[in-house]
Each structure stands twice: as structure tokens, then as C-alpha cells.
Image (cartoon, rainbow, N blue to C red):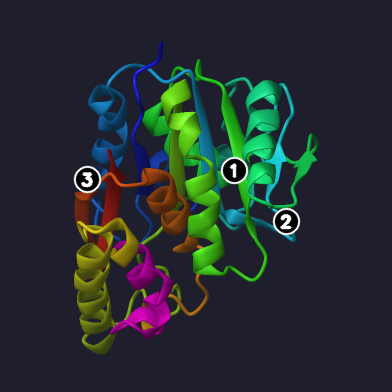
Amino acid sequence: MSVRQPTFFIPHGGGPCFFMDPRPGHPPEMWAKLAAFLAGIPASLPEPPKAILVISGHWEEPVPTVNNAAHPGLLFDYYGFPPHTYQLTYKAPGDPVLAERVRELLGQTDFSTASDDQRGWDHGVFIPFLVAFPQANIPVVELSLIEGLDPAAHEAMGRALQPLRDEGVLIIGSGMSYHNLRAIYAEHQAQNAAAVFDQWLVSATTDPDPEARGRRLAQWAAAPGGRECHPREEHLIPLMVAAGAGGTDPGQHVYSDQLMGKALSGFRFG
């Protein structure tokens, strides 16, 4: 009998940020608090998970698609970083049985699905997991977003995956609560937008009524500062999956920081 696992929405940082010296103009401690949060996740769990299902903001497909390879490689989908960051390794096994279980659960709620045994884990998976689960001894399955990025569809996808939590599977949405690369160095207006949107996001995600939470999150683009913080929402949508999989468990605001003056948050359900 497995103990029920929580779900998380984690910020995964910028590129291989935890494995390189600070870039010019970046404070030396820029990613330290996020690294400490990620490293603390295992100790916060009720027991070690049997496997991890991760939904990254860096994979979109026409239908929900699972990586069902037994030993996935890595996809170095970042550019212009030091050569050693392209030599990183993360050798956790895949889990084809879990991948098939994901497809089964989604199919029961009328999602069409697909599988892919060729695509490697993108940096929204292996970069934060090298910090959070460095032993690489827990099987990992990655699940794609759905093209179009409809928030309600992704919350429904999460709801369909709830039974996995009682089967010992840790569900993690990996993205960023703030993701406007053009405005990251801007001040004043961009900082204000990030602050007001973060306040709204915390309020919506921690709403004690799960139905109200879902309705509010589905309307994120109309929230104050929403589009300023997410000109394109692929890094926010993994939160919808984590919230849906959270079911009736209340959302908890478990990580808060400033990224170049922009508010950044992480959440847990259960």
C-alpha cells in the first residue's frame, strides 16, 4: 500500500542555471533559494515516490504524449551556455508501465493520447531533477502539454491523473510562474506587473474551493499582469495539470522569491 503523494508546480529556472557561474549582470545568489527549495522536496514527501510523472513547459503535442522509453536520453534545448552544460547527465530510468497507465487514465476521460520513445527529457525535467533527485534512482516519465495550451483542458488532464497519487507516483508540473524573457531586465512597470500577477496567482491557487480554484486559474490571462508576465503561457500551464491532479487538496504557496526583481512562486497540493 502506497502513501498518497502530493503534486507540485515548480519553477525550473533558466537553462542550466544551477550548474554554471553567474552571468554578467546577474547577482551571484540569483538561483540559490530556488536550488534550496528543489533540494528540499524529497524530505517533504510522505515517502519516496515509486515514480515521478513530470509535465514540462518545453514539450507540446497535438494530444497528450508520454515518453515511454525505458532509458530516455537528454534534450539540450537551451542555447549559448558554457560547453560543460551540454555534458550534463541524468540517468534515471524511464517507466514504460507508468507511461501506459497514464494513457489508460487519460483515455478513460476521452483524451486521445500518443507515446514517444525517441524524444529525450528536456531541460524542464533534467535540470531541476539534478538538484531535487540527484541520485537519479526514481523512474521518470514525461508527459507533454497539449497544443493550444487551453488551461481548462490541462486541469481536466490533471484530474484524470489523480489516481496515480495513490499508486505512489509524484506528479510535478515544471515551468515558471513568471516567464517574460524580454522584460526580465526591465524595471518599474514590469516589476509591478509581476508583483500583482503573483499576488493574484497565489490567491487563485490557494483558493480553498477547488472548483473556484479551477475557474480562476482558467481565467489567468484576464488577471492583472497576466499577459505581461506570460506573453505565451507554456510555462504557466503545467500549474493547471498539477492543480487538477491536486483534486480537493488545498493549494499551498511553498516557494517565493524574486528573480531580477520579478516575483516567482511554487505551489504544492496535498
Which residue is painted at 49% across and 52% down in the image?
A: 15
**Closer to viewer: mark 1 or mark 2:** 2
Which residue is painted at 57% across and 28% down in the image?
A: 140
CB-based contact (under 8 Å), mark 1 and mark 3:
no
Whether residue 120 sits left or right of residue 222 in the image: it is right
Q: Amino acid at mark 1?
A: Pro
User: Dot 1 surroundings within 10 Å: few (below 14), some, or many (20 or more)?
Assistant: few
Q: Is residue 215 magenta?
A: yes
Q: Position of residue 124 (x, y in %)?
A: 52, 47
Which residue is painted at 48% across and 18% down in the image?
A: 50
Q: Amino acid at mark 2?
A: Val
| Marks 1/2: CA–CA distance | 34 Å
User: Dot 2 surroundings within 10 Å: few (below 14), some, or many (20 or more)?
Assistant: some
**Closer to viewer: mark 1 or mark 3:** 3
Q: Is residue 55 magenta?
A: no
User: Dot 3 surroundings within 10 Å: few (below 14), some, or many (20 or more)?
Assistant: some
Q: Position of residue 174 (x, y in %)?
A: 46, 49
Question: Which quadrant, please, contains the C terminus?
Answer: top left
Question: Taking 203 as reference, is 71 above or below it?
Answer: above
Question: Taking 249 as reference, is 239 above or below it?
Answer: below
Q: Which residues are magenta?
A: 213-227
Question: Nearer the N terminus, badge 1 or badge 3?
Answer: 3
- Pointer 1 residue: 83
Badge 1 marks a residue whose secondary structure is helix
- Pointer 3 residue: 33
Badge 3 marks a residue whose secondary structure is helix
Question: Taking 34 as reference, is 196 above or below it?
Answer: below
Residue 196 appearing in the image = yes
| Marks 3/2: CA–CA distance | 35 Å
**Closer to viewer: mark 3 or mark 2:** 2
